């Protein structure tokens, strides 16, 4: 996968659980799990904005591009 | 909270799932009264078709038995036998198609019509229509070539090219709808996995 989600790491750094994040962001825990496990096909700017706001981070802290040699 | 191992509470928390759906989800509309009426009509059509199949089966069996045993109505009933066969075939067509349509309506009622399964059901409907149409013409031609004079018996004048054109059009519609449902299922999946 070219885009890697680093939500686990940042949650650990902030000492926050996925449940807590889900409550604060207003996205269901099922959806956040999809994002966390890298199964998501897209992320809305509004969701990204809310996550960054709650976790006080930049989009680049949540996701990184990894060259997997496919392109 | 996150524990020392870094694992968090990612299980499906009842408290969270009991809350109203997130705003990004579109609530499925589900079926309305028209769906229920259509379901009832299709159920009735299936029952009638089963009755027709059984009656035609008995009729054909009786005619064949009568013919084989040298009964009085032997040759006279050949056109009727072929006609019975065609009517039975049409009823089988209705049974299968109604079954698939009922499956689609069930998913509409559940609020999840855009499934790959529905695309497959529509494709099967198209395939059945084409197959039955081919078999119908094979039966008609077989009857025409070997047994029955259309002019004298008058058994097949109702089966025209126009009927076949309508059937092929119905098959084309089914295949087109199958493609639409396939695309719908793909878009639905895309939407479901958009956070």
Image (cartoon, helix red, strand yellow):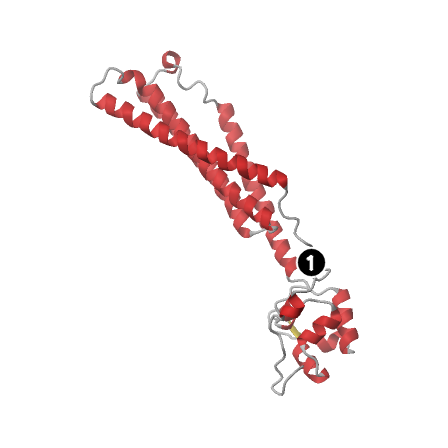
Q: Residue furthest bottom?
A: B4
Task: Answer with the quarter of the image where residue B20 lies.
Answer: bottom right
Q: Residue at x 59, y 50 (%)?
A: B110
Q: Residues within 10 Å of mark 1 (few under 14, many from 20)?
A: few
Q: Is residue B27 above or below residue B155?
A: below
Secondary element at image label 1 = loop
| Quadrant occupied by the C terminus of chain B | bottom right
Q: Look at mark 1 in the image and give the residue it sits on.
A: B25
Eyeballing the image, is B59 above or below B72? Answer: below
B148 sits to left or right of A57: left
Q: Residue at x 67, y 74 (%)?
A: A19
Name the residue at the top extreme: B152
Q: Measured from the top left, where is residue B138 in percent x and y?
A: 38, 29
Q: Residue B53 appears at what percent x and percent y?
A: 38, 31
Kindly identify which chain the residue marked by label 1 belongs to: B
Out of B29 and B174, give the one closest to the viewer. Answer: B29
Whether residue B80 appears in this view of the structure is: yes
Q: Nearer the viewer, residue B67 or B35?
A: B35
User: Of B133 and B117, which appears nearest the observer?
Assistant: B117
- Residue at 41% in and 27% down: B87
- The quadrant holding residue B172 is top right
Q: Residue at x 26, y 18 (%)?
A: B74
Q: Position of residue B46 (x, y in %)?
A: 46, 35
């Amino acid at each position: 996968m070219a885009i890697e989600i680093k939500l686990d790491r940042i949650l650990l750094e902030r000492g926050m659980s996925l449940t807590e994040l889900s409550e604060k962001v207003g996205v269901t825990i099922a959806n956040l799990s999809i994002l966390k496990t890298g199964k998501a096909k897209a992320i809305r700017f509004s969701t990204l904005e809310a996550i960054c706001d709650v976790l006080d981070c930049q989009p680049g802290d949540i996701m990184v591009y990894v060259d997997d040699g496919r392109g | 909270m996150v524990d020392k191992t870094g694992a968090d509470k990612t299980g499906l928390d009842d408290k969270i799932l009991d809350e109203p759906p997130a705003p990004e989800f579109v609530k499925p509309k589900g079926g309305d009264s028209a769906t229920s009426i259509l379901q009832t009509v299709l159920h009735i059509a299936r029952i009638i078709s089963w009755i027709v199949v059984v009656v035609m089966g008995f009729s054909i069996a009786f005619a064949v038995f009568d013919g084989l045993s040298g009964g009085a109505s032997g040759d006279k009933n050949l056109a009727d036998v072929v006609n019975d066969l065609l009517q039975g075939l049409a009823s089988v067509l209705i049974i299968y198609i109604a079954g698939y349509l009922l499956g689609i309506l069930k998913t509409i009622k559940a609020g999840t019509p855009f499934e790959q399964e529905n695309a497959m059901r529509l494709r099967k409907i198209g395939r059945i229509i084409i197959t039955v149409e081919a078999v119908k013409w094979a039966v008609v031609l077989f009857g025409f070539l070997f047994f029955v004079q259309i002019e004298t018996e008058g058994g097949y004048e109702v089966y025209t090219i126009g009927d076949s054109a309508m059937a092929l059009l119905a098959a084309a519609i089914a295949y087109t709808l199958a493609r639409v449902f396939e695309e719908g299922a793909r878009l639905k999946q895309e939407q479901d996995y958009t956070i």
